[in-house]
Image (spheres, helix red, strand yellow):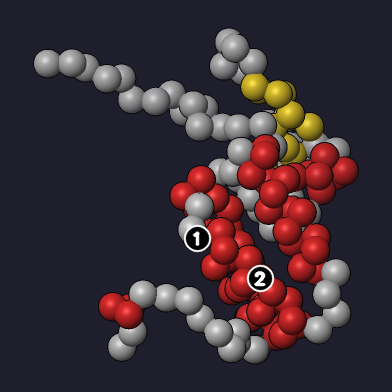
Amino acid sequence: MVYIPPPQKGAFIQVGDYVSKVGIYTNPGVVEDKRDDGTIIINTDKDMIQKYHRHSITTGLTPDEKDTFNSIMDDIMNLDVQADRILTLQDIIDKMRTDPSMKKVSDYLRNEQAQLIRWSKELPRVYDTQPEKLR
């Protein structure tokens, strides 16, 4: 029998992850560096938080995935009409679904699209889905 030890508490923490509370203080921060000895450096500068989490909390994505998410959302938020934002985001999500390496980013984009739908109370006109999901 092979024993695989459980992951350490900080094993899944990545650079750019959001930390809601640092030490005894209540300032939020972002993981700036993860050292080989297991310790991490947290930066509480608002610009650093803005760099990784401009549109929503993207903890769980790698730094490259965070950059991809933020660049897509920057383009989406530059559109003036809320319905156009939702439709354009739906098109991007549909294209990203075909690439397995972009699954996490497309999931975060889908969550962001749900947020836009709640704010605007508009729905996309076109859906790309499997027939078995229809009711």
Q: Which corner quadrant of the image does residue 51 belong to?
A: top right
Q: Nearer the viewer, mark 2 or mark 1?
A: 1
Which amino acid, mark 1? Arg
Measured in 3D between alpha carbons, the distance from the residue under mark 2 to the one under mark 1, in whole angstroms, is 12 Å
Residue beneath the point at 80% across and 60% down: 74
- Circle 2 SS class: helix
Q: Is residue 4 visible?
A: yes
How far across and down, in percent of the image, does residue 14 sit? 60, 32
Counting labels gives 2
Against 105, residue 73 (above or below) is below
Q: Quadrant of the C terminus?
A: bottom left
Disc number at residue 23? none
How far across and down, in percent of the image, does residue 2 sit? 18, 16
- Circle 1 SS class: loop
Q: Which corner quadrant of the image does residue 47 belong to?
A: top right
Q: Is residue 20 visible?
A: no
Disc 1 designates what residue? 97
| Of the image marks 2 and 1, the number of the one nearer the N terminus | 2
In the picture provided, is 74 more to the left or to the right than 90? right
Residue beneath the point at 74% across and 39% down: 29
Which one is in front, 34 or 129? 129
Which one is in front, 28 or 26? 28
How far across and down, in percent of the image, does residue 33 sit? 70, 24
Residue beneath the point at 74% across and 61% down: 73
Disc number at residue 89? 2
Which amino acid, mark 2? Leu
Q: Which corner quadrant of the image does residue 112 belong to?
A: bottom right
Q: Quadrant of the N terminus?
A: top left
Q: Are marks 2 and 1 in contact (CB under 8 Å)?
A: no
Residue ranking furthest to the left: 1
